[in-house]
Image (spheres, rainbow, N blue to C red):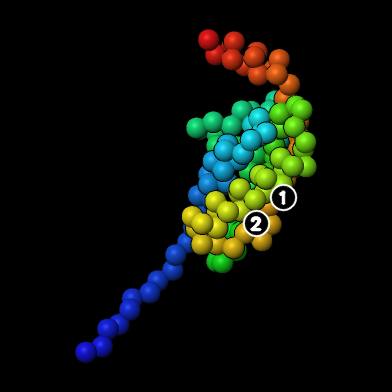
Amino acid sequence: MTEELQTGIIRIADDVVATIAGLAALETPGIAGMSGGISEGLAKRLSGKNVQKGISVEVGQLEAAIDLRIIVKYGIPIQEVCRLLQQNVREAVENMTGLQVVEVNVKVEGVMFKEEELDDVNRVK
């Protein structure tokens, strides 16, 4: 008795990888949010619907490259935050997709001060 294995193609959309990267960024201490870029004007906070803001990905068959535009919290060493962010994003994407992440590029586009955070909270109330 022989058993034939059916194989096919598995494709992971860029949006899926971007979402995973965004959620990993949310869990990284020192990250205040993702930047929507200069074209959008103001920096946007990272939350549910806009989890892909500030994230660009290129997904191949076996590899992925990720670019992140972030806003860091004031008072925390930027290099440490960025290294931890790169590590968290790489691990999350590789564990969930099986893709090899060849690069995680981080561009710091802003610093958020505590007063700005309080203003954001007061506007929501």
11 lies above or below 83: below
Point out the tag, 2 or 1, that comes first from the N-terminus: 2
Residue drawn at (57%, 43%) of the image: 24
- What x and y, as percent, mark residue 61? 55, 66
Rendered image quadrant of residue 30: top right
Residue drawn at (55%, 34%) of the image: 50
The residue lying furthest to the bottom in this view is 1
**Number of numbered discs:** 2
Rendered image quadrant of residue 121: top right
Left or right of residue 111: residue 16: left
Q: Which residue is mark 1?
A: 105
The answer to whether one can see residue 5 in this image is: yes
Callout 1 amino acid: Asn
122 lies above or below 14: above
The answer to whether one can see residue 39 in this image is: no
Q: Name the secondary structure under disc 1.
A: strand
Residue drawn at (58%, 54%) of the image: 91
Q: Which residue is mark 2?
A: 65
Callout 2 amino acid: Ala
**Of residues 70 and 24, which is closer to you in this image?**
24
91 lies above or below 99: above
